[in-house]
């Protein structure tokens, strides 16, 4: 958690236009930090529980959603209602598509809620951040599924078929893929902004 908190702080420091949004005193860096720290606080537990139990507890996802809600409220209070509206709209869109995938059996409801929250938090970056987030999350999930299938086939001759079927039936935990993709995008985005700043100074 400490490492992720440090990443969140770095991302906030690298946020473009980190200036006061209005007389309320909030700045873009602070708003970013609030949301990212909320995700950092629950990431380790979410990953651990999803890997072990294939579920994302509502209380943990709710904590991340609460941090996103606070950051969105700070945007509104700071006079940046357009960014807040964009964040909410994209999160709702992600939730809608996620719900369709859940109804088709492709996602769990915890994944849908977490994906919507993370989308809302990344929505104020450039569009490539969101594309990279979902693209990387999907790629990681496919990779994990491929590795599990390969390992299951290799073990099949040494284990009971019923045990293999039970493992396969548990599905791929998508929560860790979402969180890994989120933090990768945050790190890459922060690094690129920092590099741009250095180049500008030079």
Image: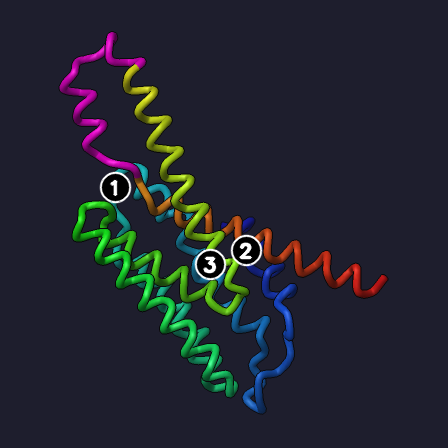
Question: Which range of residues does the magenta coloring cover?
Answer: 154-172
Lateral position of residue 69 relative to residue 18, left or right: left
Q: Residue furthest bottom?
A: 23
Which residue position is annotated with label 2? Answer: 186
Please tell me the numbered disc located at residue 130: 3
- Point out the image quarter for the C terminus: bottom right
Q: Quadrant of residue 167?
A: top left
Which residue position is annotated with label 1? Answer: 54
Q: Are marks 1 and 3 in contact (CB under 8 Å)?
A: no
- Residue 145 image offset from top left, x and y in percent: 33, 32
Lateral position of residue 107 relative to residue 195, left or right: left
Q: Secondary structure at mark 1?
A: loop
- Residue 106 image offset from top left, x and y in percent: 23, 45
First reached walking from the N terminus: tag 2 or tag 3: 3
Query: Which of pointers 1 and 3 indicates the residue nearer the eye?
Result: 3
Q: Is residue 135 above or below residue 165?
A: below
First reached walking from the N terminus: tag 1 or tag 3: 1
At horizontal 37% and vertical 39% (from top left) the residue drawn is: 141
- Residue 193 image offset from top left, x and y in percent: 67, 60
Q: CA distance from mark 1 to mark 3?
A: 25 Å
At horizontal 31% and vertical 68% (from top left) the residue drawn is: 92
First reached walking from the N terminus: tag 2 or tag 1: 1
Q: Please tell me whether residue 33 belongs to the stretch shown in magenta.
A: no
Q: Is residue 45 above or below residue 18?
A: above
């Amino acid at each position: 958690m400490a490492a992720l908190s440090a990443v969140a702080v770095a991302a906030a420091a690298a946020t473009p236009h980190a200036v006061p949004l209005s007389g309320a005193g909030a700045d873009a860096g602070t708003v970013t930090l609030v949301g990212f720290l909320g995700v950092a606080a629950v990431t380790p537990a979410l990953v651990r529980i999803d890997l072990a139990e294939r579920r994302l507890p509502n209380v943990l996802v709710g904590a991340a959603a609460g941090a996103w809600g606070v950051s969105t409220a700070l945007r509104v209070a700071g006079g940046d209602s357009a960014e807040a509206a964009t964040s909410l709209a994209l999160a709702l869109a992600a939730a809608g598509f996620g719900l369709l995938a859940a109804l088709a059996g492709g996602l769990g409801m915890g994944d849908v809620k977490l994906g919507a929250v993370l989308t809302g938090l990344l929505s104020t970056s450039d569009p490539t951040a969101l594309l990279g987030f979902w693209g990387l999350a999907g790629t990681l999930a496919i990779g994990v599924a491929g590795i599990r299938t390969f390992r299951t086939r290799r073990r099949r001759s040494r284990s009971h078929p019923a045990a293999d079927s039970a493992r396969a039936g548990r599905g791929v935990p998508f929560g860790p893929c979402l969180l890994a993709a989120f933090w990768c995008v945050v790190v890459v985005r922060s690094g690129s902004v920092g590099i741009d700043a250095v180049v500008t100074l030079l």
